[in-house]
Image (cartoon, rainbow, N blue to C red):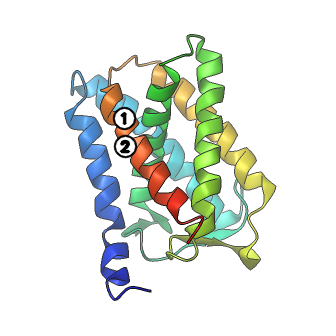
Amino acid sequence: QSEYSEWFLSLTPLNLILYSFFIFFNAEQLNQKFLLAFSIPFFIGFITEFLGVNYGLIFGTYEYGNNLGYKIGNVPVTICLNWSVLVITTGDLSKLFIKNIWLKSIFVGFCMTVLDAIIEVTAPRFDFWEFENNNVPLQNYLGWFVIGSIAYYLYQKFEVKTNQKVSLHILAAITVFFSIFLFI
């Protein structure tokens, strides 16, 4: 492990905040409608994570570590930003080749579940979160798929326009970063 590991991990919340700022400042119109749309996956993420970490519902029994920053009700605020970032970026990816909103929503849920599966490998190692007995239950992935699909379906109702290139770069950065750790 590098002598810079702790410093690097402590920057994780800043990284998620920067992704959010990139999305905000590259949106076609940064207005109340956009903020409301962004808040949909944010608050859906908070509610589902709160039910998860405090009651073992939806995703299984797990708890968050300290490397994701400030928590409200045992839920790191940055994980809620993560929900919004993933819904928006995977949603922008879906817009490239899917027209039907139901199919887009399913695709977004699928992409978010795949990303979660990749991140689950390193989450305990980075002190992000850890499931009971280090066993990620199937219900976690089902929860991600269903909640991700619903969050996108509700988000897209606002028809806000984000910058697809920025979204795709953010999505690629997240995917590549965590995929590397599958092999290390």
Give the number of the disc on residue 184: none
Figure quadrant of the C terminus: bottom right
Marks 2 and 1 sit apart, C-alpha to C-alpha, by 5 Å
7 in relation to 32, above or below:
below
As drawn, which residue projects farthest toward the right? 138
On the image, the x and y values in percent for residue 95 come to 48, 19
Q: Looking at the picture, tell me which residue is in the foreground, 156 or 167.
A: 167
Disc 1 marks which amino acid? Ser
Q: Is residue 73 visible?
A: no
Labels 2 and 1 touching (C-beta < 8 A): yes
Label 1 neighbour load within 10 Å: few <14, some 14-19, many 20+: many
Query: Residue at the location (51% across, 76% down)?
Result: 127
Q: Is residue 184 visible?
A: yes
Query: Residue at the location (43% across, 35% down)?
Result: 89
Q: Looking at the rendering, which quadrant does residue 27 occupy?
A: top left
Q: Which residue is mark 1?
A: 167
Q: Looking at the rendering, which quadrant does residue 4 occupy?
A: bottom left
On the image, the x and y values in percent for residue 96 come to 48, 19
Query: Residue at the location (32% across, 26% down)?
Result: 162
Judge left or right: residue 127 versus residue 8: right
Disc 2 marks which amino acid? Ile
Give the number of the disc on residue 170: 2
Total numbered badges shown on the rendered structure: 2
Figure quadrant of the N terminus: bottom left
